[in-house]
Amino acid sequence: MAHWVYILYSKQLDRYYVGETENVDVRVEQHNMHLFRGSFTKQASDRVLCTTIACRDRAHARAVEAFIKARKRRAFIERVMSDAALRIGLAKKF
């Protein structure tokens, strides 16, 4: 089954969140309903989906997610969101 890496944005916090899931729509709703106790996304309920990256499976999605998170730069996340070729390249890299 396919997995997805997703990027959410909260205007309230002016921050991005990167995660992975099998079902993006359900996961965004879960984040906004604060279903994950103690999680970073519990701080806001206005998260919107910015982009997704299709992955083969969970291990693949986790590798892509870790790569994005390791960059620790807002500019890199915004580049991923705006550059379809970069998203495709990230999916192929792992």
Image (cartoon, rainbow, N blue to C red):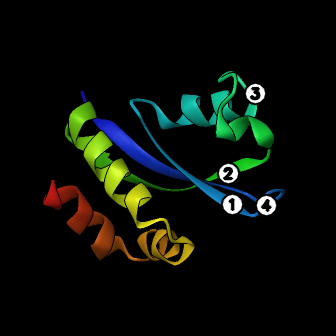
Label of residue 15 in the image: 1
The image position of residue 6, as x and y in percent, is 47, 49
- Of the numbered discs 3 and 1, the one sitting upstream in the chain is 1
Q: What amino acid type should be assigned to the residue bearing mark 3?
A: Met
Categorize mark 2 by other alpha carbons within 10 Å: few (<14), some (14-19), many (20+).
some
* Residue that numbered label 2 is attached to: 48
Front position among marks 4 and 1 = 1
Q: Nearer the viewer, residue 36 or 57?
A: 36
* Residue that numbered label 3 is attached to: 33
Secondary element at tag 4: loop
Secondary element at tag 3: loop
Secondary element at tag 2: strand
Q: What amino acid type should be assigned to the residue bearing mark 1?
A: Arg
- Of the numbered discs 2 and 1, the one sitting upstream in the chain is 1
Categorize mark 1 by other alpha carbons within 10 Å: few (<14), some (14-19), many (20+).
few
Quadrant of residue 58 in the image?
top left
Front position among marks 3 and 1 = 1
The answer for how far apart the CA atoms under marks 4 and 2 are is: 9 Å
Find out whether the residues at labels 4 and 2 contact each other: C-beta distance under 8 Å: yes
